[in-house]
Image: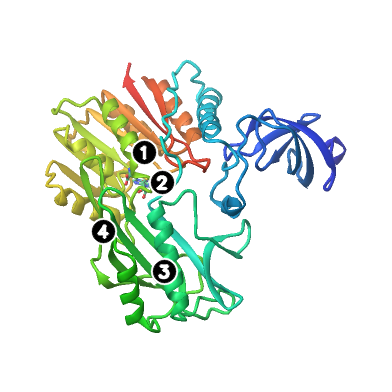
Amino acid sequence: MTESIPVKKNDYVDIQFEDYTHDGMGVGKINGYPIFVEKALVGEQAKIKIVKVKKSYGYGKLIEVYKKSPFRREIPKEEEHQYGGCQIQHMTYEGQLKFKEDYVRQVLKKIGKLSDVPVRPIIGMDEPNHYRNKAQMPVGQKDGKLISGFYRPRSHEIVDTDESIIHLQEINEAVKVVKEVASTLGIPAYDEKNHKGVLRHIYARYGRETGELMVVLVTRTEQIPKKKQLVTELTQRLPKLKSLIQNVNPKRTNVILGEKTKVLWGRENIYDYIGNVKFAISAKSFFQVNPVQTKVLYEKALEYANLSGKETVIDAYCGIGTISLFLAQKAKNVYGVEVVGDAIEDARRNAELNGITNVKFAVGKAEEVIPKCAEEGIRADVIVVDPPRKGCDEKLIQTMLEMKPARIVYVSCNPSTLARDLHMLEVGGYRTIEVQPVDMFPYTSHVECVSQIVLK
Ligand code: SAH
């Protein structure tokens, strides 16, 4: 069997890249045997070193690029270690958008057999740098100094960083200040290996529309040495701070947050807006990390829902109710369904915060709750789904086919499962009018899409 594999580990070979994997690795072939290489771009010719050989594919490492793609972006030194989270930082923004749009087209054709469905040009950001409103940075110690930053890829070594190209500058600044203050006061960093020390993570969230900052200090112990000075310094040096929280995580674990949360200073929440809907954000609550593009995505969803004010809408997989509250302003009634109870509590609170009274939320699996709604005689004119990566449960697709809403709006974070589900809907009597990709996460390989599907 191994005879048919044309390369061995540690070989150096020349290769041309023809394609991408879903997470943006370049794919080239040697005698038909595919090799995946990080940071390689389609159209490039390069020398690679083979690092792993499997039965039907292998992995290589880029050694020298002979012919460079016009979409290649040279990565500044200080950004290199952000690679773990930023799979496509070696592409220009134009290249990133092209990669995502092409990928959606390809997957719809291959998995969904929907080559005639129009894919609209992807909507990118005008300013793709510094968009993320949240950061959770691990803290450690190096040469007697407190450091925080990103883990080196595939390791637990922390690379000290103050700048991240994806975090909002207010977030970068907050992390830097906390690090400096904690370091000056001699607050011990958490030592993962021996499970000693205090400060585990610096976690910051920022409301872009409101200018409100939240800082969460994740600690191993309840006690924080010099707590009073720490609070005073942070409130003085961070004028946008509205909420300073301590989260205690005494466990040996990779999970960042522990159970116990207390307010050290200020409020328990900060606020932010998506469009004109206001959201309360606590340390533990979910909130979209790129509210600018979330608004773009959900406005498109609203357009596709095509509401006149008379419709009953079901928002399956509603999370904290972002889409439900957005749609409620244009619909008669909205029913939101979500499996996580805490998210539904947030959703209800957010409805109240905005004085929105025509939404009802239910906790449970969409594929179980929605068939019951149908039995109770609830007729949905529009169903919106925004499922996790694995896509819609088949039972939910069947239920939608039986309920026959006039329109389905599908928000997806995974083009492959979107394609699979659109195919099922197509076979069941629906037609996909169009698919609109929206870039929610520049520098990463994540692709979001929204599609309009109508009853034939
Ligand atoms: N639109 C939402 C986010 C959706 S993310 C917002 O803006 O808040 C997908 C959501 O689906 C998650 O909140 C997840 O908890 C939920 N979920 C996962 N499986 C589910 C299921 N079987 N039924 C209902 N909700 C589910």
The residue that mark 4 highlights is 270
Type of amino acid at the residue the image marks with label 3: Val
The residue lying at 43 percent from left, 57 percent from top is 172
Q: Is mark 3 within 8 Å of ligand 1?
A: no
Alpha carbon distance from label 2 to label 4? 18 Å
Determine whether label 4 and label 3 are within 8 Å by CB: no
Front in this rendered view, residue 85 or 404: 85
Viewer-side label of 2, 4: 2
Q: Is residue 249 visible?
A: no
Viewer-side label of 1, 3: 3
Considering the numbered disc 2 on the image, is that residue within a helix, a strand or a loop? loop
Alpha carbon distance from label 1 to label 4? 20 Å
Front in this rendered view, residue 383 or 72: 72
* Location of residue 234 (image quadrant): bottom left
Sequence-wise, the earlier of marks 1 and 3 is: 3
The vertical placement of 110 against 384, above or below, is above
Sequence-wise, the earlier of marks 1 and 4 is: 4
Viewer-side label of 4, 3: 3
The residue that mark 3 highlights is 178
Q: Is residue 337 visible?
A: yes
Viewer-side label of 2, 1: 2
Considering the numbered disc 1 on the image, is that residue within a helix, a strand or a loop? helix
The residue lying at 29 percent from left, 54 percent from top is 343
The quadrant of the rendering that contains the C terminus is: top left
Alpha carbon distance from label 4 to label 3? 18 Å
Determine whether label 1 and label 3 are within 8 Å by CB: no
